[in-house]
Image (spheres, rainbow, N blue to C red):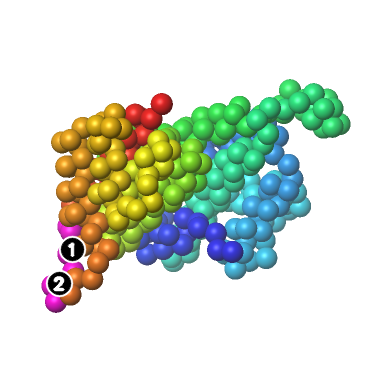
Amino acid sequence: MLTDIFLRRYQGVLEYDKDRAKRIVAPTLTQARLIFEQDVQPKLNLPRSFYRDLNLQLGRELSAARLWVIDADNQHERCMLYLSETPDFSWGNDAAIDLHCKTRLSLVELLFRNAEEYARRLPKKVSMLDSLRSRDWRKLSRLKGRNEALSVVRKATEELSARLQANGTQLVYHNGLIQIASDVRTTQRIAKPFWEIVADPKWKTVDHEMKEAFDHLDHGQRDAHAHAAMALESTIKIISDEKGWTRGNENGAANYIDHLVSANNGRFIEVWESEALKVLFRELRNPQSHGAGSNPPPRLLDAQQTWAIESCMSWIKSLVQRMP
C-alpha cells in the first residue's frame, strides 16, 4: 500500500538548496525532533513496534530496506538519528540536498501522523488492569487514554506548525500532512480552526477531499477548486444525514441545501445563505463534474482557485460550528 509522503507530493514543486537547507530546514528538523522526543514519546510511551513500522514504512517509499544510519541498532534511535543527520554541504549537487531535506521532512510528517493514529486507537480510558499488565511500575503514570493522548499529540502538532511558520518554511502541518501554507491571517482565522474541526473521524471524507484540493493547487492543476467544493458538498450531506432530513431521492447538492434552508427543518441556514451556496456549486463544481462539450473547459486563475478553496473552508467551518 502506498504511503502519502512529503517527498512525493512536492517533488518538483519545492526546491531546497544549500542556503535554505542550512538556514531553514536544519533548525526546523532539530526542533521537530525535540518536540517529538520531549513532548510526545515520554507521555505516550510509544512501543518499539511504532518505530519499527515507521522505519519500514518510509524505507519502502524511499526504495530502501530500512532507514540506514550508522551505529543505530534500536529502531527508535535509528529514526531520531536519521532525522538529525545533516547533509554534506560541500556537495555541489543541490538535487542531493533537496532529496535529503524532503526525506527528513517526510519522516517528521510520518512521526506525527502515526502518533495521531496510535492515539486514536487507544481505549477511551486506561483501567487498573491495563496498568497492572504493563509490568513496569515506572510507566504507570504515563499510560493514557485516548482523549488525553490525542490532547498530547494535538499540542505537539500545534507547536510543530508554529515552528514551521516561525522558521519561514512556508509550510504548515494539519491532520497528518505537511503542506504549503497560505498567508498567516488566513491560516489563523480559517485554516487552523477548519483542520481542527475535520480532525474528528466523522469528517474524514471532508478532510481527505480538502487535502486533495490543496495537493492539486500546489501542483498547478486546474481542478483544485472542484475538490474543495466536493468537501463542502460532503459536509452538507453529512449534516443532512445526521439531522434525519435526507430522503434518498436527492439529485445533487441543491437538494441537500434545500433541506438545510427548509422552514420545516428549522432553517439551519438562511435563505440568502442557501442562494450563495447554490451559486458556489453551480459556478465551481458543476463545470468540472460534467463534460464541457464544444466549449473550452473552464480555467480559474491561481488567485481564484485559492479564493474558492478558502471560501469552501469557511463555509464548512461555519456549518459544522452550528451543529450541537
The quarter in which the N terminus is drawn is bottom right
Q: Amino acid at mark 1?
A: Arg
Question: Residue 260 is drawn in which quadrant?
Answer: top left
**In front of the other: 56 or 27:** 56
The quarter in which the C terminus is drawn is top left
Place of residue 7 in the rendered image (x, y in percent of width and height, measured from the top left): 47, 59
In the picture of the structure, the residue carrying the numbered disc 1 is 299
Instruction: Give the residues drawn in magenta, as a range.
Output: 294-303
In the picture of the structure, the residue carrying the numbered disc 2 is 296
Q: Amino acid at mark 2?
A: Pro
Side of 146 where 92 appears, left or right? left
Side of 44 where 99 appears, left or right? left
Foreground mark, 2 or 1? 2
Residue visible at 60% across and 58% down in the picture = 58
Q: Secondary structure at mark 1?
A: loop
Q: Mark 2 to mark 1: distance in Å? A: 9 Å
Question: Residue 128 is drawn in which quadrant?
Answer: top right
Residue visible at 59% across and 29% down in the picture = 147
Residue 57 in the magenta stretch? The answer is no
Contact flag, marks 2 and 1 (Cβ < 8 Å): yes
Place of residue 27 in the rendered image (x, y in percent of width and height, measured from the top left): 47, 41
**In front of the other: 1 or 243:** 243
Q: Main secondary structure of the magenta part?
A: loop
Q: Residues within 10 Å of mark 2 (few under 14, many from 20)?
A: few
Question: Residue 270 is drawn in which quadrant?
Answer: top left
Q: Secondary structure at mark 2?
A: loop
